[in-house]
Image (cartoon, helix red, strand yellow):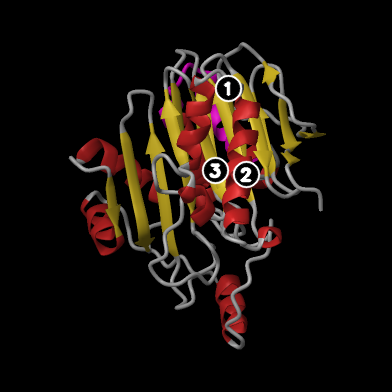
Amino acid sequence: MNRRYFLKLASILGLAGSWPLQAKTAKVASTTAQTVKTAVKPLVISTWDFGMQANDVAWQLLQQGGAALDAVQRGVMLVEADPTERSVGYGGRPDRDGKVTLDACIMDHQANIGSVAALEQIKHPVAVARAVMERTPHVMLVGQGAQQFALEQGFKLENLLTEQSEREWRQWLKEGNYRPVVNIENHDTIGMLALDSHGNLSGACTTSGMAYKMHGRVGDSPIIGAGLYVDDEVGAATATGHGEEVIRVTGAFLVVELMRQGLSPQAACEEAVKRIQQKLLLRNAAIKDTQIGFIAISKAGEYGGYCLQPGFSFAIRNAFENRLHQASALLIS
C-alpha cells in the first residue's frame, strides 16, 4: 500500500496506530478464463483497479479474524471517500442536473440486507445501507427518505460535488450529449465479496452511477439480486457496468444460482455475461457501447471474473496472492 493510501486510510477510517499496514507490491495478471481453486479462507475480491487498495483495508480485518460483513463495508468506504475516483461516492460525476446521487447495498451470510438509492449529500452510502439493515424493519430507503434516515442516525450533510466534477459537468452541458464510454466514465462501481476465517460470506456494492444520468435514475448497484447477492450455502456475486442490463437478468442472483447448479464461479460469470449478450441481441441494442463485468466466489474459496468487453479488472487477495486480474471477455475488441 503506498503512502497516499496509508494516509487516506488513517484519516478516513481512523486506522492510524491500530492496524499495521504492510506494504505489498501489487501483481497484475492477464488471465484467460479460469477458476483458481484456493481452498483457503479468508478471501476478498473486488472490482476494478482500486480494488487493490480496498482489498488491503478488508484484509486487515479478515486476517485478524474479523467478520466478512465488517471487512466489505470498510473496504468499499475507502473508495467512497476518495475524491479522485469519479464514479463512486465523493467526487463522483453528477447527474444531468448537477446533483451527485449515490446508491449502495450490503448483504451478510444470514440474508440480512440493506440498501439506499438516490441518496444525496452523504459521503458513505454503504454505511447508511448497513444502518437500514440493522436499525429498520425495511431493506431499502431512497431519495429524501434515505437522507432523512441518515441524518437521524448521525450522518452529516456534505457537498459531494468536487470542483473537477463540476467543471466536467458544465462542459458536458454545452452539448448535453449522453454517450457512455465503455470502461471509462460509467463502470467503476466497486463491488466487494469476502469469505472470512469463520466461513461466512458477505458483500457490498456502492456507486455514484452513470455520469450525467437522468435525475432519479437508479441502476443495479443497490438492488439485491442484481448488483449483489450472497447465499452462504453456495457463494456470492457482484456486478459492474451498465446497470440496466444487469437488472434485466437479475445478474448477481443468476451467477449464484448457476453455482448452486454446479458451475464454478468462473463458469457462472461467463454464462451470466452470455445471457446479457443474448438480451442485447434480442433488442438490437448497441453492444459495442455496453460493458458488463461479474465477479464471484464460492463457499469453498474458488473465485472467478468475466466481462462483455475487454478492459474489466478485478482484485483478489488471500493468503497466497494479492494481485490484479484482467478479466477475460466474451467479445474481442
Residues at marks 3 and 2 touching, judged by CB atoms closer than 8 Å = yes
Per the rendering, the mark at residue 56 is none
* Region of the chain picked out in magenta, as a range: 53-70
Residue at 49% x, 21% y is 260
Kind of residue at badge 3: Ala
Disc 2 secondary structure class? strand
Q: Which amino acid does label 2 sit on?
A: Gly
Residue that mark 1 sits on: 43
Left or right, residue 310 beside residue 177: right
Q: Which quarter of the figure has residue 313?
A: top right
* Residue 239: mark: 3
Q: Residue furthest front?
A: 282
Residue designated by label 2: 293
Residue occupying the point 34% across, 62% down: 157
Image position of 172 with respect to 8: above or below: below
Total numbered labels placed on residues in the image? 3
User: Which quarter of the figure is the N terminus placed in?
Assistant: top right
Nearest the camera: 57 or 183?
183
Q: Residue at x 65, y 35 (%)?
A: 270
Q: Which of 59 and 3 is in front in this view?
A: 59
Front position among marks 2 and 1: 2
